Amino acid sequence: MAEQLSWKVGGQQGEGIESTGEIFSMALNRLGYYLYGYRHFSSRIKGGHTNNKIRVSTKKVSAVADDLDILVAFDQETIDVNYQELHANGIIIADTKFKPVKPEDTDAAFYAVPFTEMATELGTSLMKNMVAVGASCAIINLDVSVFLGVVEEIFGRKGETVVQKNMEAIQHGYDYMKEQLDTDTSALQLPPADGQKRMFMIGNDAIALGALTAGVRLMAAYPITPASEIMEYLIKKLPKVDGTVIQTEDEIAAATMAIGANYAGIRSFTASAGPGLSLMMEAIGLSGMTETPLVVIDTQRGGPSTGLPTKQEQSDLMAMIYGTHGEIPKVVIAPGTAEEGFYDTIEAFNIAEEYQLPVILLSDLQLSLGKHTVEPLDYSKVNIRRGKLVTEGIEPREDKSYFKRYEVTEDGVSPRSIPGVSGGIHHVTGVEHDETGKPSESPANRKAQMDKRMRKLDELTKVFPNPIYTNAQHDEADLLLIGFNSTGGAIEEAMVRLEADGMKVNHARVRLVHPFPTEEILPLIESAKQVAVVENNATGQLASIIKMNAGYPQKIKSILKYDGNPFLPHHIVESSKELM
Amino acid sequence: MAEQLSWKVGGQQGEGIESTGEIFSMALNRLGYYLYGYRHFSSRIKGGHTNNKIRVSTKKVSAVADDLDILVAFDQETIDVNYQELHANGIIIADTKFKPVKPEDTDAAFYAVPFTEMATELGTSLMKNMVAVGASCAIINLDVSVFLGVVEEIFGRKGETVVQKNMEAIQHGYDYMKEQLDTDTSALQLPPADGQKRMFMIGNDAIALGALTAGVRLMAAYPITPASEIMEYLIKKLPKVDGTVIQTEDEIAAATMAIGANYAGIRSFTASAGPGLSLMMEAIGLSGMTETPLVVIDTQRGGPSTGLPTKQEQSDLMAMIYGTHGEIPKVVIAPGTAEEGFYDTIEAFNIAEEYQLPVILLSDLQLSLGKHTVEPLDYSKVNIRRGKLVTEGIEPREDKSYFKRYEVTEDGVSPRSIPGVSGGIHHVTGVEHDETGKPSESPANRKAQMDKRMRKLDELTKVFPNPIYTNAQHDEADLLLIGFNSTGGAIEEAMVRLEADGMKVNHARVRLVHPFPTEEILPLIESAKQVAVVENNATGQLASIIKMNAGYPQKIKSILKYDGNPFLPHHIVESSKELM
Amino acid sequence: MATATTFKDFRNNVKPNWCPGCGDFSVQAAIQRAAANVGLSPEKLAVISGIGCSGRISGYINSYGLHGIHGRALPIAQGVKMANKDLTVIASGGDGDGFAIGMGHTIHAMRRNIDVTYIVMDNQIYGLTKGQTSPRSAAGFKTKSTPLGSIEQTLSPMQLAVTTGATFVAQSFSTDLKDLTAIIEAGIQHKGFSLINVFSPCVTYNKVNTYDWFKENLTKLATIEGYDSSDRQAAMNTLMQHDDLVTGIIYQDTERPSYQQLVEGYSETPLSEADLDLGAEAFDQLVKEFM
Amino acid sequence: MATATTFKDFRNNVKPNWCPGCGDFSVQAAIQRAAANVGLSPEKLAVISGIGCSGRISGYINSYGLHGIHGRALPIAQGVKMANKDLTVIASGGDGDGFAIGMGHTIHAMRRNIDVTYIVMDNQIYGLTKGQTSPRSAAGFKTKSTPLGSIEQTLSPMQLAVTTGATFVAQSFSTDLKDLTAIIEAGIQHKGFSLINVFSPCVTYNKVNTYDWFKENLTKLATIEGYDSSDRQAAMNTLMQHDDLVTGIIYQDTERPSYQQLVEGYSETPLSEADLDLGAEAFDQLVKEFM
Ligand SMILES: Cc1ncc(C[n+]2csc(CCOP(=O)(O)OP(=O)(O)O)c2C)c(N)n1
Ligand SMILES: Cc1ncc(C[n+]2csc(CCOP(=O)(O)OP(=O)(O)O)c2C)c(N)n1
Ligand code: SF4
Ligand code: SF4
Ligand SMILES: [Mg+2]
Ligand SMILES: [Mg+2]
């Protein structure tokens, strides 16, 4: 029996590949299996190879699997491009329609199944994906009845007949495959799952849900891959809390509109990817200088420029920390899982308001678009903290002097009144200003205000929850692996294998990348013989940040991948061994 | 006799303060004195205190002086704000018109002179600045006839009478002052200068002249302080080489228009300051990804956001190195003097074309707007290198395949054909592409192209002329002072004083900030007991870069100033001593 | 609303740093008067401005004020209004701010029709950066950036506004304090976006479009018999015939609802007063949708 | 000019990755035909495009091509033309590219009148990002980003162009290959900026503005008796009357010189061929001015 299974479906974009994976995994999720999906797709609408690789397990999994058990192919390209991932007792099932050819150099079993033909017989070729799902079930010995709920949900509003037809298609695929199957597939059969209901969502859903839970009322955004889903979720949900999404004319408008809304006292934000973030840099500086809360989500994708818009990368780190001219306090958070995406988004809004500064929540394509089983989210852990917001009780001043919105305080945070609040009138400007917001060029004032603003970062590494996620069993490790965002899962799996080979490995995943939690990570670096920073980029950006803050330029090595694909555990295992 | 003299004129903006300083210094320049000016001004058009502090010397000077010899005041504020800079035998001369009050706690001599009254008598109060110039001459014992040439140049086209009247005003001021003068001013008298003709220009002039000499034909720009003078110079000069300046609708248009023009084979560029640079980040990424040459000048000013637009700061360093999402090869150069501004601008254009990438030339307000005596520029040192530009002789390909514009080469640079060249047709895109420019998502191609692009930086620290300016007399220094851009002058003067106090001090000024010349600076850091990085910013950006690249996080200390004013030598002397 | 206010309530302690004689002084005064006339209290007014000499205006009015970045007054102002529908939101800035770098936002704000009153201080030049050509400069206009005279077509904000579907399009002259005040009042009261372009002479850098020049060249729409500001085509024709040099309310569409009125489910009360807590029940419901 | 070319000379080896049936195929074909018809040789044509499905077009024509960043095709194209006046420069992209994020550049390119032919593939939607509302979407149009229907005023690029002083304003429909080709030819030959808005249906995401819809709703200007494309006011009125749904050359001003013609001292030969060396003498002269 397999502990886990890796299944992939592939074909041309626009042919229903996505829904095949979707239906298959939804059903498995409902049985209580843990899933981890990754979609390979191109920057075009129809055509071009796409595939969806889904890992199924009875335990939590957080990485794309190294290899593959079952490959479902809707075209020859899918076979050619992916068959090498199959291990020896893997299986290919391919639509007879394209006359599939089995590659010579594989031990995997090969079955041509008339997906399209059977679907057409049932009424429409569109159901070929259902046939493929059924055939997959036959291999892993899954009772097709589990699909009823899912199919009803998806096709229910089209009527009972459609539901029935689709269930039939699944059943036909199952039956056909069962009949053909002449290989021993016991190694591909999963033990029963725990039957727990768990959420199954992409990282962007988790982030969007986090924003909604944090009390967002206005999202201003411009579409872009791989961020658009955040906007699309909230378009549906914000009206339920009297709020809305505005699709702006560009990202500059999105960021500045969000600033305006935050200034006026609501929680508002925007989400984009690299090109949009580059355009927002001036706005982010305005937020920092005027101390107006602002949350911006950056779903990283392959750069630079338009780059590889549908591919995984983690190359915006430096630009997010250091982008915008001049110096502002800014917080950059990098959740590693959908769960963290949810909680950290809420925390991003809290920090933005408590510290009155821009917070960039960094995600990456693998996290944002990968569909994963998510552990229950605990609403009781959610709290909304608005910091020094003052909405009433301000003493009126006879002399019409302004409210000291930028009062120099010990923690750098000043009381904040919002438009509409009587007695709270003040001026806000991106020009250097005095305590009331009046422009000032006085050197002493400049220094006081600059120091005040920068002071906000002093405590942040202390108050942020788990700035470094650590899995460090060893007082003295042979190797410390460091990563951020979605690489964590692959690192954890690599650790297990390296440990099995007798290596002592610790793992530190940086969740707060700016301000950098030097003190928290330093002991781990010092106690490790060797340090490797695992990043989906070409220049080792996180490694640079660590060197800048913690030193040890010699000891810190990089494991890099920048070909558009996520790390698989074996990449990290191999590179780690090479380093030692 | 004084080796050098520090003179300041102050008053309300829009009252001719600028021209007072201008005329005074032009004449001194023509006598062969070395000058170093710094203007204090506000972000408004009329009103607000402004002053112009000019250092005059028989030797090259490159810093604002710590103290002041002569203060010419057109209002009381000028006295109140500036008198403390005067040393004991300094002199204040103030217009009687505003009934000037001498501060109590100063030993400086004080004279009220009827600047306005005398000017009015001569025909117009506008000539009060001439009277003040004359009075200044009386103090330093300068023959007023030296002003004739300057006055003729400025007022010549208004007719002989105007010239004469102005000369008379100078003479009257001189005579009046001579008569009043009852202090010993021998310490304020300069030895005669060498009579050499030298250029007297602001850093922006030097940069603009550099661009013109480098062969620029189109400048696309949007006005902003303190960059606009570059544009204003070229508006007058480019038509002489058949070129032009286009004032665009914004900085995004400016940068992308320059990219278009470079793509089509001319040298084109833009110049701006922080806010503009933040807006250009996406365009800079396009230049990097498409390997299209692009030069951008960033004249740094007080940030963040609109910040202190008329004040000195060096806080864009990180944003210039790391701005733009994803990873591109980029070069960032930081000249320290007007001379370097000229040569480095030419080099920026050469590097941009040779390496086919964006080059950011960093200046700062002190360098860009300070008016300085400039050593002769050697035209014979100018050479124009266009790299692998191919404009003819490309073999036509029967199969209509594209020219390999992005051929993978050892040095990372590919042959570059431009529109119009037969046989050179290819595609250019910010999307990841193959050797001919066709979009490609292949992982192997991605890696090859990414590596190729980044390879361009490998040799740069070697080929760039003097990536680190060093004044290092000591094998083992007690202190290594490091700076960039305009702080060099103050550092050099501080060195002299620290050495006089028995300290061994070396100086390294970083001229190439990215890629960072680690090897060149490392020996200096290693051989110094203590390292202090002198920067006009709040977070120690250059220090961070050095730590990231060269290590030594403990040894490297910061001397920072971020109140909007330039470093004076004594700041560095004092801070250095504190560090030791 | 609080007790009746006068324009003095909208004065603060800050002395404007504009040049003596700058047209912007009167614009400031007109805003203060209009605000008082429509019965606002200072804390219910938010003035959002861009960067330029004119952009300093948000600091000279006793109200909430935000001086943002160059060209972005409008998106910021729209965000403010969306957050708190009870505020009166005035966006303001220069012709460079709104018609050069901010051109895109201006067009889209007009299309979107969020209830913001946008006042442009149009001096046909860049004041703060010391006199360069603006999109409003006339052909042949000589400035630092066009020493030989501008060679681009002058932008017509009024025609643009009419064709873009703006629901309130007006023009005024900064010395016509009474007219200007009345127009600003009407703009504030208009439900939807209003664009008010004000000729506000730059006495320092624009020696062509002076007070006298405008006095000579402007025609008040009130003097055109039978002018009907609800007729879009007539508005367009009048603008073309007068080379845009008219003052008054050029076009107003009182029927099209504002953006906020059109947003499905948009709050009836200021969002800024909402309780942010979702509640465990609503949260559970959302979570279930992913199961 | 080289030997006569045919449209096949403008075909390359790249298979477009547009959806089958996408309107952009015909636009590509029309550009290829027009280029051949006016006698261009491929290396003298530069196609500069934005980001979107439509933006891919620069890669599908055998000519120099640059696929830039979202919304910036026009400033890039203007830079190219300024650098080499002998090139024919076509800028192209989608309605989102040109009228949302690129709106400001579009207006200013029209004002500036540099000799670039701008072809917008207007499908009233964002194709590449999978179907969101564009400024060209009709009110009530339902998309991913406006599930309840768009509530913003639809942008009229043609009216904007006419009021902005564009010197060549035309509209076409991607299936009218002959008309479209002729219009592109005219645009290329026009001295100055030309805007050609092409209705180019998105068969995947826009189920409202389909081929059939356009066939039913478009009026050819050629069928309007006495239509005079040199009369600006008439152009404006016709657009208003037909709700912009006309095809043909709407307005052309053949008198206003292009920007390049107006630049004092601008090169008569391509700047890209200039010798960059200033020469010691000229340099000395420049240096002396600072002494
Ligand atoms: C992004 C950016 N670019 C340029 C500037 C410099 N700048 C400040 S104000 C201004 C234009 C001023 O003209 P206008 O908007 O007409 O205002 P006015 O001063 O005439 O009132 C410019 C270009 C800036 N602050 N930010
Ligand atoms: C700065 C930036 N923002 C957003 C995107 C994402 N994006 C790519 S194409 C596009 C719009 C596509 O619509 P349109 O311009 O109409 O072209 P079409 O695909 O319809 O031809 C967007 C928003 C981007 N590439 N760059
Ligand atoms: S420069 Fe012109 S616009 Fe600016 S304050 Fe002075 S008069 Fe007004
Ligand atoms: S999505 Fe629409 S615009 Fe894009 S290629 Fe397909 S049909 Fe054309
Ligand atoms: Mg202006
Ligand atoms: Mg479109």
Image (cartoon, coloured by chain):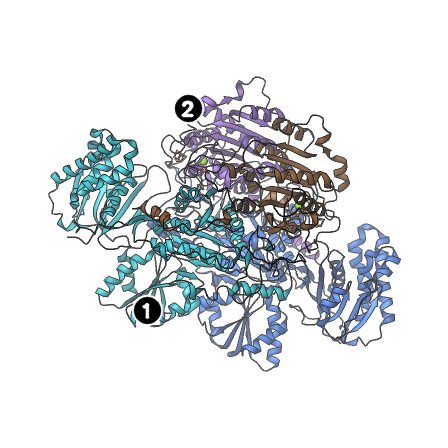
Chain colours: A cyan, B blue, C brown, D purple
Residue B35 visible in this rendered orientation of the protein: yes
Residue D212: numbered disc: 2
Position of the C terminus of chain D, as image quadrant, is bottom right
Query: Which mark is in front, 1 or 2?
Result: 2
Of B155 and A283, nearer the camera is: A283
Q: Position of residue A349 (x, y in %)?
A: 45, 55
Corner quadrant of residue B227:
bottom right
- Hey, which residue is sitting farthest bottom in the picture? B502
Compared with D83, D155 (above or below) is: above
Based on the displayed image, in which of its 4 quarters is residue C172 positioned? top right
Q: Residues within 10 Å of mark 2 (few under 14, many from 20)?
A: few
Circle 1: residue type: Gln
The residue that appears at 59% across and 18% down in the rendered structure is: D226
Q: Which mark is residue A530?
A: 1
Q: Is residue C265 magenta?
A: yes
Q: Is residue A294 magenta-colored? A: no
Q: Amino acid at mark 2?
A: Asp
Task: Judge whether B315 appears above or below A252 on screen.
Answer: below
Can residue B33 be seen by looking at this rendering?
no
Q: Position of residue D25 (x, y in %)?
A: 41, 31
* SS category of the residue bearing label 2: helix
Q: Is mark 2 within 8 Å of ligand 4?
A: no
Q: Quadrant of residue C239?
A: top right
Marks 1 & 2, CB-CB < 8 Å contact: no
Say which chain tag 1 marks: A
The CA distance from mark 1 to mark 2 is 67 Å
Mark 1: few/some/many CA within 10 Å (<14, 14-19, 20+)? many
Say whether residue A228 is left or right of residue A138: right
Is ligand 2 within 8 Å of the beta carbon of the residue shown at mark 1?
Answer: no
Residue range (magenta): C263-268
